[in-house]
Amino acid sequence: MIPFPHHRRAILAAAGGAPSSSRKDPLDSPLWEGHARAYLGDRAVVFDDRVRVVLPLVTENQAQVPVLVDARALGSVDEIAVITDIHPFPLTLRMAMPAARAFVAFRMKIEQATPIRAAVRKGDLWHVGGRHLDAQGGGCSVPPVVAKTVAWNRIGEIRARTWHEADGALRLRLRLLHPMDNGMIANIPVFIVETLDVADADGAPLATLRLSEAIADDPTLTLLPEARAAGRILRVTARNNNGGVFRTDVPIPEGSAPDTREDRP
Amino acid sequence: MTRPGPSSPTRTNRRECLGLGLAAALTPLLPPGAEAKPLRYTLAPVTIAPGIWTLFGAPEPITAANGGAIANVTILDTSDGAVLVDAGPSHRYGEALKALAEALTGKPVVRIYLTHYHADHVLGATAFETGIVAAGQDLTDDLRRFGDALTSGMYHVAGDWMRGTGIPQPGRFMAEGVEAVGGRRFRILRLSGHTREDLCVFEESTGLLFAGDLVFLDRAATTPDANLPAWRTALTTLAGIDHRLMVPGHGPVEAGRRGIDQTRRWLDAIETRIEDGFRRGLDITELMAAPLPDWTTPIAVAEYESARSVMHLMPGLEATELPLLHRA
């Protein structure tokens, strides 16, 4: 890939201490305005360093790029939209969080170097943070499709575990065995997990995610739902674009949850 | 894989101008600086034994500054000609290596042993006749399957140093056993762990052990294709060889087993750190930022390689060690 000068400037600006909050795109990407219009609606947008997007130093595998969004510094928020500027599916993931911390970690597929952003909505304002991901350009660098093997008889298998966070939230790590075929390869139709919901034992939603074709195979997520009082489980429900539904209950370990039933009114 | 040709504007101009005569086509239309300054590797051979020179790789990641010259390459003089262990990262490196080997030994290069398929060790082999390039079957197959990805990755990180680099096609099968070349005896050992096929070379007449990338010394080991149990078994095998000098794939040449011990300790440390982070519920990105043990401070690129290792090894734990709650 040819490194575009504006990317370099963006990196320098970010390293040199960009203003903590501004209306001008710190990554100086020509695609940003269109994406913002398409995905963030009419609400105001502000670039805000409190929205951290953490990317690896090096893109080791373009089909499994780990991305972490941490906007806990904003307090409780309503929604997170992850937007990848240079990508056939720019809206990577959308997450509403009735009762979860402003945090999500996941893996995605990328085709070339691109800015990756998180837009975090708190009321009527989008707070946006992002980083530039360096990577090889061109689809030819993506590992060959033939190398992929799908365990068809195990599709929908869910592995998950929860932990108590020091600040009272729960930590949920989850891996759902499922291809994320994006429909852009001849003779392989779109086959993806579209939604993934986390609820408490009573079914009250804590976090609801909409995943795009850009998410890596076998979606692997880390979320921080609130430790609600209802029961000792989290209910996870995922649905794919063929209508297949995958459900499981994830046990919450006994112990250090400060937010117990007794504390509630 | 296509080799980089002239940029398209130049090509168009040349074609348009062919009618005006060749000289007009080539000279006046090339603006100053149309060709990048030719890059040249400075190879600094260090004598490690009589008639044996090692070119030490930089203890760094592959960058556009070092041209990928990060792995050790060794030249051995024999009565039949020069023998090389590994060929460096690019065609241009291979050409410089060939000239150096001929100058040092006064003879042509008659054999090149490739230890494993990683780009920093093999891509220089395109500068040599395929009939003298010896490699294992898996290496040859892997180059066929992943060669394009290897070279395009190298073009991305090392840039113009890679000009003219293609995919080597080793013409000789490197079998286990002893090959005698010009008075030296090269014992080939077929091990694995760093990749699925790691060929080590033990030169019996001098007791030199070329461990390839099964041994890293004072430079963090890389794990993109690692199988840690197999790697540990290979280190045990290497420790059982009564060698006089150890030539690691990366790092200084020494007598003794420091390289073997340090590589084992490093592998144990990154595996423990990744398992520990996994048990605490960390995602890849969080674990990459976690601190390393103090003893690793003097090891070059420790943070960089340990972060890469998290990306290589964590997904395997997630796929097998997270509790299985819903079976399809």
Image (tube, coloured by chain):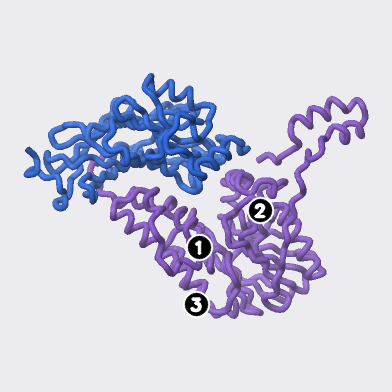
Label 3 vs label 1, nearer the camera? 1
Q: In this rendering, do the residues under marks 3 and 1 share a single chain?
A: yes
Q: Report the residue at 28% width, 38% height from top.
A: A75
Compare residues A151 and A180 and report the one nearer the observer: A180
Q: Amino acid at mark 3?
A: Gly
Q: Residue at x 7, y 38 (%)?
A: A265
What residue is drawn where x is 58% and y is 67%? B251
Give the residue drawn at x 26%, y 32%.
Answer: A97
Q: Earlier in the sequence, mark 3 or mark 1?
A: 1
Residue B230: image location, x then y, percent? 44, 63
The one of A208 and B22 positioned closer to us in this rendering: A208
Is residue B107 something one can see in this rendering? yes
Residue for badge 3:
B240
The amino acid at mark 1 is Ala
The CA distance from mark 3 to mark 2 is 35 Å
The amino acid at mark 2 is Gly
Q: To which chain does the residue with label 3 belong?
A: B
**Where is mark 1, residue-wise?**
B220
Q: Chain of mark 2?
A: B
Q: Position of residue B69 (x, y in %)?
A: 65, 58
Chain in purple (letter): B
Say whether marks 3 and 1 touch (CB < 8 Å): no
In blue, which chain? Answer: A
User: Would you name the residue on which mark 2 appears?
Assistant: B67
State which quarter of the image contains the C terminus of chain B: top left
Element at label 1: loop
